Image (cartoon, grey):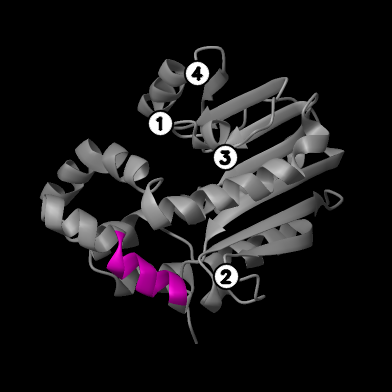
Amino acid sequence: MWFVPSNNRQRLRRQPTQEDLSVWSAINKDLLEWLYTGMTGFFQIAGHRVIDIWARPYNEKVVLEIGSGHGHHLRYGKNNYQCYIGLDIEYKFLSTLKERLPRTRVVNADSVNLPFRNKSVDCVLSVYCFEHLRRLRDCLKEIQRVLKPTGELLVGLPAEGGLVYEIGRRLTSKRYMERKYRIDYDAIVGWEHWNTCHEVIEEIGQHFFIRGFRYLPFFIPSVHLNVIIVLRALPRKLV
C-alpha cells in the first residue's frame, strides 16, 4: 500500500518542534515563492494553466477560489475573471494578494464555513490547498451547498504519496529548506499536509462526480508517475 489513512499517518509521523514551527511561520512565504521557480515552478504553473483552461466558460460568472493564498492562480493564469473571489483563512496571505492585485475581491474565512448563500457560486477552484485541510469533508459539503447545480469544482493537487513526487520533493524543496533554514522538513510537511493525493480524490468522489483528470507532466494515468494531478468534478444531488 502506497498510503495510509490520514489519522494513522499522523500518528506515524514525527511532530515538528515548537522551534521549527516558529521558523516555518516566518519563512513559509519564501517556500511558496520558491516553489514557483525553476523545475518545480514549471510543474506548479502547468497545473494552474490546466485549471485556467477548464474555467474559461465561467469567466463572466461567479468564481470562488478556496485557499487563494498569495494569488498564484491569478498571476499565472490567463483568464480575465469578471467576478473572482479569493478566500483564505490566512489574513497575511490575502494581504500579499491585495498588494499584488489591489482590485481583487478577497474574503478572510474558513473553508468549512463559507460566507455565501446556497447555490450562489458558478465555479469553485482550489489549487494545491486540499492536501492541507484537516476538515476536508466539511469543506466539500460547504462547496456542495454554495455551488450551483450547473457549476463545477476544479482542483489541483500535488501527487503526494506518489513515487515520482516524493523523490522530487527530496531533491528540491526538502533540500532547499533544510539547507537554508536547518528545519526538520519531513516533520513540517507531515504537520502541514494532512491528506495524500489518493485520499483527497477519494473524498471528492464521495461528494461529487469526477468527470475528468489531467496528469502532469507525463499524462500517464497514475499518481505514482506524475507530479501534479488536476481534476474536474460536478455536484451530486445533496441528500
Q: How many tags in the picture?
A: 4
Q: Badge 1, how many Cα within 10 Å: few under 14, some, many 20+?
A: some
Q: Nearer the viewer, mark 4 or mark 1?
A: 4
Q: Amino acid at mark 2?
A: His
**Residue indicated by mark 2:** 198
Give the answer, above or below, for where 181 lies relative to 58.
below
Q: Badge 3, how many Cα within 10 Å: few under 14, some, many 20+?
A: some
Q: Which mark is residue 99?
A: none
Q: Position of residue 135 (x, y in %)?
A: 52, 50
The answer to whether one can see residue 84 in this image is: yes
Q: Residue at x 65, y 76 (%)?
A: 220
Q: Nearer the viewer, mark 2 or mark 4?
A: 4
Mark 2–mark 4 Cα distance, whole angstroms, equals 34 Å
Q: Position of residue 5 (x, y in %)?
A: 49, 73
Give the answer, above or below, for where 146 lies relative to 92.
below
N-term-proximal mark, 1 vs 3: 1
Q: Nearer the viewer, residue 131 or 215?
A: 215
Residue contact between numbered discs 1 and 3, judged by CB atoms under 8 Å: no
171 falls in the magenta region: yes
Mark 1–mark 2 Cα distance, whole angstroms, equals 26 Å
Q: Which mark is residue 101?
A: 4
N-term-proximal mark, 3 vs 2: 3
Q: Residue at x 55, y 29 (%)?
A: 87
Q: Which mark is residue 90?
A: 1
Q: Amino acid at mark 4?
A: Leu
Judged from the image, the secondary structure of the residue bearing numbered disc 3 is loop
Q: Residue at x 21, y 54 (%)?
A: 177
Q: Residue at x 40, y 20 (%)?
A: 95
